[in-house]
Image (cartoon, grey):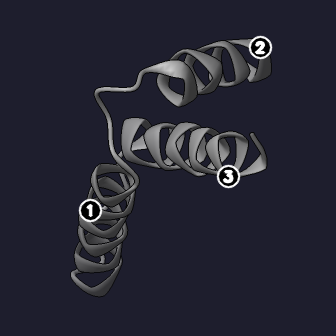
Amino acid sequence: MKLDILAEADRLADDQRITDYDFWRMLKNLDNEIFRANSAREPIPFEAVRWRAILRQARSRRRSH
């Protein structure tokens, strides 16, 4: 699973069509969805947590280049 996340993060970080704002907006939307589910005492979708990890890693890799 960890290799999946790192591979996808690398792919997204190298995609020049995705702007820094796009990364920020996607992360904000995921954080809001996770917060909403948590507040409503609903299960947090595993895919949301997975994509948040991918986007954080991609954003970090983009900044380090």
Mark 1 closeness class: few <14, some 14–19, many ≥20 residues within 10 Å = few
Q: Earlier along the polypeptide chain: callout 1 or callout 3?
A: 1
Image spot of residue 53 (x, y percent): 59, 45
Image spot of residue 22 (x, y percent): 28, 51
**Type of the residue with mark 2:** Leu
Q: In what quadrant of the picture does the C terminus appear?
A: top right
The image quarter containing residue 33 is bottom left
Q: Is residue 50 above or below residue 11?
A: below
The circle on residue 42 is: none
Whole-angstrom CA distance, mark 3 to mark 2, is 20 Å
**Type of the residue with mark 1:** Arg
**Type of the residue with mark 3:** Arg
Whole-angstrom CA distance, mark 1 to mark 3, is 16 Å
| Residues tagged 1 and 3 counted as in contact (Cβ below 8 A) | no
Lateral position of residue 26 relative to residue 56, left or right = left
Determine the residue positioned at 78% across, 47% down: 64
**Front position in the image: 31 or 20:** 20
Q: Is residue 40 above or below residue 61?
A: below
The image quarter containing residue 40 is bottom left
Task: Report the mark closest to the observer, 1 or 3.
Answer: 3
User: Which residue carries the number 1 mark?
Assistant: 25
User: Which residue carries the number 2 mark?
Assistant: 3
Secondary structure state at the residue bearing disc 2: helix
Image spot of residue 11 (x, y percent): 54, 15
Lateral position of residue 65 relative to residue 48, left or right = right
User: Which residue carries the number 3 mark?
Assistant: 63
| Residues tagged 3 and 2 counted as in contact (Cβ below 8 A) | no
